[in-house]
Image (tube, rainbow, N blue to C red):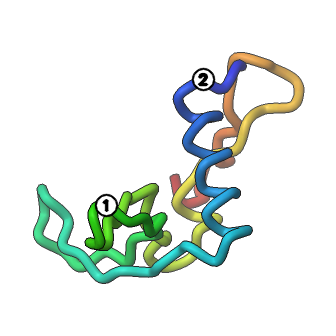
Amino acid sequence: MSIPSYARTNFQTLLRAAGDGNLALMECLDAVTGSPRYVICAVGRDDGDYVFTPFGHLADGNPYDAYLPPDPDDPEGFLRPESGEAP
């Protein structure tokens, strides 16, 4: 499975911001649910003002429960939990 170019570009921007010390962790509200989210942002400047570009939020709870990893035996698939495990 191929990672789209926009995701690769954003990841490279995130790495540069981290290398330059220009990352911030910002408390925001989820636009749909209104729940608090802790968002990783790149920090830039625009005419003397700070600009925060959100890249994603930290997983609430156990991040291993939040994501399904790619299946090493199927380049188009993802590993699924065994029956009886959390989704």
Please state which of the two labelled residues, at mark 1 or mark 2, is closer to the viewer. 1
User: Residue at horizontal 32%, vertical 72%?
Assistant: 50
Q: In the rendered image, which residue does mark 2 sit on? A: 5
Amino acid of disc 1 = Asp
Query: Can you tell which quarter of the image residue 31 is in?
Result: bottom left
Q: Quadrant of the N terminus?
A: top right
Q: In the rendered image, which residue does mark 1 sit on? A: 46
The picture places residue 62, in percent across and down from the top left corner, at: 57, 76
The picture places residue 80, in percent across and down from the top left corner, at: 65, 40
Left or right, 66 with reference to 44:
right
The earlier-in-sequence mark between 1 and 2 is: 2
Q: How far is the residue under mark 1 from the one under mark 2?
A: 26 Å
The picture places residue 26, in percent across and down from the top left corner, at: 35, 80
User: Residue at horizontal 64%, vertical 77%?
Assistant: 21
Left or right, 55 with reference to 51:
right
Secondary element at image label 1: strand
- Asked whether 59 or 85 is in front, the reply is 59
